[in-house]
Image (cartoon, coloured by chain):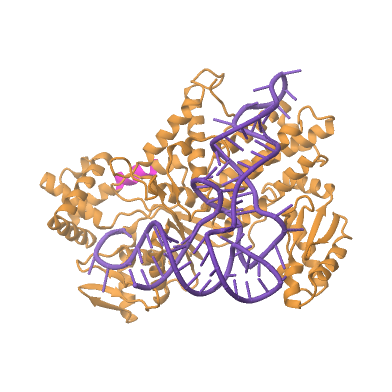
Chain colours: A orange, B purple
RNA sequence: GCGCUCUUAGCUCAGCCGGAUAGAGCAACAGCCUUCUAAGCUGUGGGUCGGGCGUUCGAAUCGCCCAGAGCGCGCCA
């Protein structure tokens, strides 16, 4: 089904065409003046400019025609030329009924499905996920879900950091500590992580150690068997650990490829660059110079002077693989916005090498999670906070507001743990997704366990209240009712529901989950008002009761869908400690 | 030095391909639980949209200038 707004747009477009107006401006939006109208069209103002005519006259023509439509209650032209449209209650009600019976809640799928590859992981071997990985995973996963929902074929790849200098650093450190690599296969995640920390310190202090690490990295990349064997173990252990982390975040990756998988193709990229005469050797490194504009464009380093591949050639090679193997129409990188120059360079080289001629390359940059000082977040000892620890702290806060196991019937330890987890993750994720991705935010543990106002748990709570009513009402009969709009609050709620499709489309177009977050909050808020003024179970008659139950169920389904697109779960019940 | 991004209520942020009275949340204050979960609802106060100039019938939104902040700028990824 077409959403109510789309149906209105079709009506408006037809009218524009009848008058021979450019249809670019033939669309409505929810009214800025709910006191005057449900929807408004500003097209007459825009048309007036190009046609050099009076906007009010143009508006009146459109309004007069639209007023004849049986779905329209009234149309007026106000101010300089706003077309204010008021809909008939029956039209809104009928739309709600259709939406309630539509498996996609009135959201139309794209007419042009694309193969989209998403890159939003970027974890590294030997490094536990930290707060910096939170945003990439949460935002990326949400965009993945949104794009899938509108009908694209999305393939997500974690793009494991397993081929860089940190590998040589770890191997060098093991050799330094053990004398050789014989014991590597006994090391678990924690051991590896600690070795990496020590390696990092030693390489920073000792230039010779850093040099050795670089040489080992190059050797590893060139296939040194001993190094490769040890590397395989390190990678396997890290992948397993990181998978657990992503499972907890509910972030899904179709592919668990890494930089190392692009190794062969990287060799090809260097060849292609050479054949096209684009590369040159400078200071021992193989580079590609980019045309200088007024913007600083450092060259792209394909092969470093020590013989190892730089991360840029790996990214370029990965583009080629995604185009050749995965038939990517579009590749989206959800990565810290500080890397924007890197992606500009990589995209430009991909263009110069003609490896992705018809693939859209896009970097969705997000802001950093900052500490109270406004700088990227550090723990008190100067380190980065573990993602796992962060989640645990949030859970503890949430747990303190929950009943103890077995205080509530049917809620033993397992059920309480599940509820705590769902609420804590909702708080964390919503906090991260409620603002536009590009803006950073100041990390405050309190925010990650907040329940009031514009938070994830607020929306979960609205859902739980609806669930509670539906349990009492025998949900199976609900869909048989017919939605009737009589009260003002019912009308407002219905119009808010009708805007779901619009929110989805904007979020998909902009790759911006905060639009869904904002919508979900606003819908929950509208419902809460309705809940306070319009009795559902005790409605004046059976028809109204059936109608309101159906409307409430539709709100519940829409909220659940919206939360799902944010990667947030909706518990059946929300419990609170006494 | 060059470039990118940003500056909106006490705080955190929406709004920005020009349009009516600039919106939320938090915080503050005042109300609402014998009725569907008060993690809720209703109301009040709070803004020369960093400053200036320009384009326009109309600018938070577009352009230029200035001030302030953050980030980035070849062998870490």
Percent position of residue A565, x then y: 56, 47
Percent position of residue A373, x then y: 37, 47
Residue under the point 24% across and 67% down: A304
In the rendered image, residue A368 lying in the magenta stretch gets the answer no
Q: Seen in the image, is B75 located left or right of residue A24?
A: left
Residue interval drawn in magenta: A236-244
Q: Which image quarter is the C terminus of chain A in?
A: top right
Q: Is residue A523 above or below residue A259?
A: above
In the rendered image, residue A238 lying in the magenta stretch gets the answer yes
Percent position of residue A537, x then y: 76, 28
Q: Is residue A396 above or below residue A383?
A: above
Q: Seen in the image, is A226 located left or right of residue A96?
A: left
Residue under the point 40% across and 34% down: A392
In-front residue for pair A545/B4: B4
Q: Quadrant of residue A187?
A: top left
Q: Is residue A221 above or below residue A538?
A: below
């Amino acid at each position: 089904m077409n959403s109510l707004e789309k149906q209105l747009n079709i009506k408006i477009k037809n009218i524009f065409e009848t008058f021979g107006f450019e249809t670019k401006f033939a669309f409505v939006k929810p009214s800025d003046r709910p006191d005057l109208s449900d929807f408004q069209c500003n097209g007459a103002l825009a048309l007036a400019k190009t046609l050099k005519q009076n906007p009010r006259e143009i508006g009146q023509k459109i309004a007069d025609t639209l007023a004849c439509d049986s779905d329209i209650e009234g149309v007026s032209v106000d101010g300089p030329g706003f077309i204010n449209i008021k809909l008939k209650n029956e039209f809104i009600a009928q739309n709600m009924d259709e939406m309630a019976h539509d498996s996609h809640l009135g959201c139309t799928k794209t007419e042009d499905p694309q193969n989209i590859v998403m890159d939003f992981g970027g974890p590294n071997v030997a490094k536990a996920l930290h707060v910096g990985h939170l945003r990439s995973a949460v935002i990326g996963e949400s965009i993945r879900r949104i794009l899938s929902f509108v009908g694209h074929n999305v393939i997500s790849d974690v793009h494991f950091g397993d081929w860089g200098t940190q590998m040589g650093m770890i191997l060098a450190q093991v050799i330094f500590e053990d004398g050789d690599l014989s014991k590597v296969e006994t090391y678990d995640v924690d051991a590896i992580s600690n070795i990496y920390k020590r390696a990092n310190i030693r390489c920073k202090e000792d230039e010779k150690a850093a040099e050795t690490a670089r040489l080992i990295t190059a050797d590893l990349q060139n296939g040194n068997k001993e190094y490769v064997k040890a590397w395989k173990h390190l990678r396997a252990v890290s992948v397993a650990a990181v998978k657990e982390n992503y499972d907890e975040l509910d972030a899904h990756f179709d592919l668990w490829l890494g930089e190392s998988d692009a190794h062969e193709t990287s060799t090809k990229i260097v060849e292609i660059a050479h054949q096209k005469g684009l590369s040159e050797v400078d200071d021992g490194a193989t580079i590609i110079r980019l045309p200088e504009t007024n913007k600083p464009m450092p060259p792209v380093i394909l092969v470093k002077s020590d013989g190892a591949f730089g991360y840029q050639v790996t990214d370029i090679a990965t583009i080629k693989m995604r185009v050749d193997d995965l038939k990517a129409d579009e590749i989206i990188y959800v990565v810290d916005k500080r890397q924007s120059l890197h992606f500009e360079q990589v995209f430009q080289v991909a263009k110069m090498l003609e490896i992705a001629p018809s693939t859209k390359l896009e970097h969705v940059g997000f802001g950093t999670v900052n500490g109270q000082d406004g700088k990227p977040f550090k723990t008190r000892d100067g380190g980065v906070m573990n993602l796992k620890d962060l989640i645990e702290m949030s859970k503890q806060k949430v747990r303190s507001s929950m009943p103890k196991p077995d205080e509530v019937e049917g809620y033993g330890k397992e059920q309480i743990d599940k509820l705590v987890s769902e609420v804590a993750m909702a708080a964390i994720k919503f906090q991260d997704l409620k603002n536009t991705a590009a803006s950073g935010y100041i990390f405050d543990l309190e925010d990650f366990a907040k329940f009031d106002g514009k938070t994830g748990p607020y929306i979960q709570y609205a859902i739980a209240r609806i669930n509670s009513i539906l349990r009492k009402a025998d949900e199976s009969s609900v869909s048989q009712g017919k939605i009737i709009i009589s009260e003002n609050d019912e009308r407002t709620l219905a119009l808010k529901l009708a805007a779901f499709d619009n929110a989805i489309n904007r979020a998909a177009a902009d790759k911006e989950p905060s639009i869904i977050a904002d919508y979900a909050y606003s819908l929950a808020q509208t419902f809460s008002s309705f809940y306070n003024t319009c009795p559902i179970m005790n409605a004046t008659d059976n028809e109204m009761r059936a109608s309101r139950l159906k409307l409430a169920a539709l709100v519940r389904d829409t909220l659940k869908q919206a939360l799902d697109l944010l990667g947030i779960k909706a518990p059946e019940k929300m419990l609170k400690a006494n």
